Amino acid sequence: MDGINFFDAHAYFTRLASQNKLARQQGFYPCSCSGINSLEDVLQHFRSQKAFVCVDDTNDAAIQCRNGCWYQRRVFTVFIMIRYTLMDMKDRAAKLDICRQLFRQIHSRMIVDKHNSDGDLAYLNVEDVMVRELGEYFISGCTGLYFTLDNFEPIYLCYNEQEWTTEEG
């Protein structure tokens, strides 16, 4: 499988955030984190940035056989978050709507990119994307959503006898 370019989620979503008009207008800052419990880059830039497209740099994976071929299913998580005026629920609702709009635009772009790709985006599962909105008290003064995206990358699992020895220990 040497000819396959594996999906670089951070580079891809950073590029989308920099090219999207709504993201640029609202000042969405592309960054990364190591899961929902840490959000390191968001917290580090919380005072200087007002909105974030944050890609989780860890992912879950599973090996699956589909139609006789082996694939590694990697699951990526992307957070779209924006600050709102604390204790102002109308502002929170308006800012959450911005995140919803940005997600819709990103999702539509992913569909186009996948169908125009013969490389690293060809294996994205854009037909089944889970989205969850963040609760009111997730981070004080910040609202948004996150989505998860599957990527099914071919994996080479042919047994090679030369990788093994008959000796024990």
Image: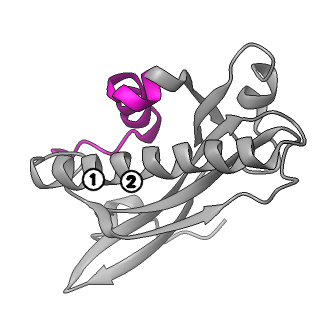
The reply to whether the C-beta atoms of the residues labelled 1 and 2 are less than 8 Å apart is yes
Q: Residue furthest bottom?
A: 67
Quarter of the rendering containing residue 3: top left
Along the line of sight, the residue nearer the viewer: 14 or 155: 14
Magenta span: 1-24
Q: Residue furthest front?
A: 90
- Mark 2: few/some/many CA within 10 Å (<14, 14-19, 20+): few
What residue is rendered at 87% in x and 36% in y?
86
Total numbered circles:
2
| Any part of residue 125 in sight | yes
Q: Quadrant of the C terminus?
A: bottom right
Point out residue 1 in the picture as x, y percentages from the top left corner: 20, 53
* Residue 66 shown in magenta: no
- Residue with the mark numbered 1: 108
What residue is rendered at 72% in x and 57% in y?
134
Q: Tag on residue 104?
A: 2
Task: Compute the Cα span from label 1 to label 2.
Answer: 6 Å
Along the line of sight, the residue nearer the viewer: 122 or 158: 122
